[in-house]
Image (cartoon, rainbow, N blue to C red):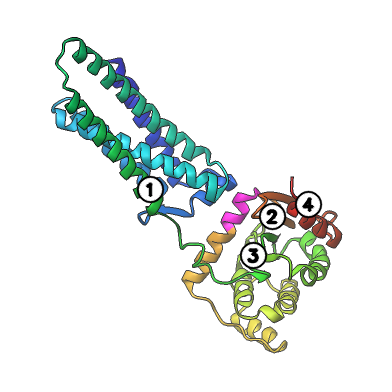
Amino acid sequence: MKKRIFMRLFLFAGLILAVVSEMNICSTAACTETHKYTLLGMPFGLFGIAFFVTAWIVYELSRFHSIFSNLFLLMVFGASGAEVAFILIQKYEVKQWCPLCLGIASTVYLLAIMISVERIIAIISEFKERKVMFMSLLKKVSIILLVFVIGFLTAYKGAQKSEAEERVPDIFLGNKSSAAEVYIITDWFCPACRLAEQEIEKVVPAIDKRAKIVFVDLAIHAETLNFTPYNLSFLVNEKDKYLELRKALATMTLKTKEPSQEEVQRAAASLGATYKPLSFLALNQSMKFYEGIVRTFKVNSTPTVVVYNTKKKKTVKLVGVKEITEPNILKALDETARAD
């Protein structure tokens, strides 16, 4: 009876962790990076939900027929092999530990341990009664090992980085292949952001060859969302003139909170540029990307500049006009690139 209570407890814990993972509640950098991966085209969280629900049903049916008991065993050991692959991916590809993923792995291994203990006790008892056949036992162990290996290979080969990030339009400036990333996070109606623009205009040309530069809109003021589609369009289509167009948009915020397409088009034309509306899908993907950046680096105010090195996994966050200066951003680039 106690064994069944613990089994259900572990299955319930695994299911809850999978649901939380699918809801994307975890905001750590490791969780965000892990969410970019899919297993056989399915998000990890959704795959986990499907596994634990199915495993629970099979486990409850095991009370009525031994075939379900054996199927449950194979499912758990297949999942154990898959979790080894996921842990290796975290260590060598993501290079960060996702707490939810490790929690799910723990529940799978606890299930495997309980099943193993139960089966070992049964085998010892059969040995004492001389009812166990060595070849039969070897066959069962071989099948379990085979399922474990299949689970590992399926997960290792089937885990792919999602194309969601690749579908984000090319809103990036600077050296896109650089390990150094500079996120400039502002709000179009934030007075402090307007004060910081002068330093931002100076620093972008100074770092564009050594860092990937990402301008991120964070709508502290709701009216900022009226300017974001225009800003994104210029980031995609008018990179060479972006800083000038950004200045024109900033000037426009002093006159209106909801600019028309014609007004933006005239402002762009005066600078020899063209406003080309992005598709809804492109806008949606870009906004999700912005939300992910804000969540990953725990940004809750503007202006904020985040300097992050993808190889060293180091981050420096500069908040407010006093901290956001050209020397500080250059210093942050050096700090994040420096070896420990």
User: Can residue 151 be seen?
Assistant: yes
Per the image, the residue denoted by label 3 is 223
Which disc is residue 308 wearing?
A: 2
Q: Tell me whether the residue at label 4 lies in contact with that at label 3, contact meaning CB atoms closer than 8 angstroms.
A: no
Residue 109 quadrant: top left
The Cα–Cα distance between marks 4 and 3, rounded to whole angstroms, is 36 Å
Classify 329 as above or below 236: above
Identify residue for label 1: 155
The range drawn in magenta is 291-298
Total number of numbered discs in the rendering: 4
Q: Nearer the viewer, residue 117 or 171?
A: 117
- Lower sequence index among marks 2 and 4: 2
Q: Residue at x 39, y 34 (%)?
A: 14
Q: Which mark is nearer the camera, 3 or 2? A: 2
Between tags 2 and 1, which lies in front? Answer: 1
Circle nearer the viewer, 2 or 4? 4
Q: For mark 3, does the 10 Å Cα neighbourhood hold few (<14), some (14 to 19), or many (20 or more) residues?
A: some
Image quadrant holding the N terminus, namely top left
Work out which quarter of the rendered image holds the C terminus and state it.
top right
- Tell me, yes or no, whether the two marked residues, 3 and 2, touch with CB atoms within 8 Å: no
How far, Cα to Cα, is label 2 from label 4? Answer: 10 Å
The percent coordinates of residue 192 (x first, y second) are: 79, 59
Which residue is found at the position 49% from the left and 54% from the top?
A: 36
Precedes in sequence: disc 4 or disc 1: 1
The residue tagged with tag 2: helix, strand or loop? Answer: strand
Disc 3 vs disc 1: Cβ atoms closer than 8 Å? no
Element assignment for label 1: helix
Q: Estimate the x, y position of residue 66 in percent, counting from the top left.
A: 15, 28
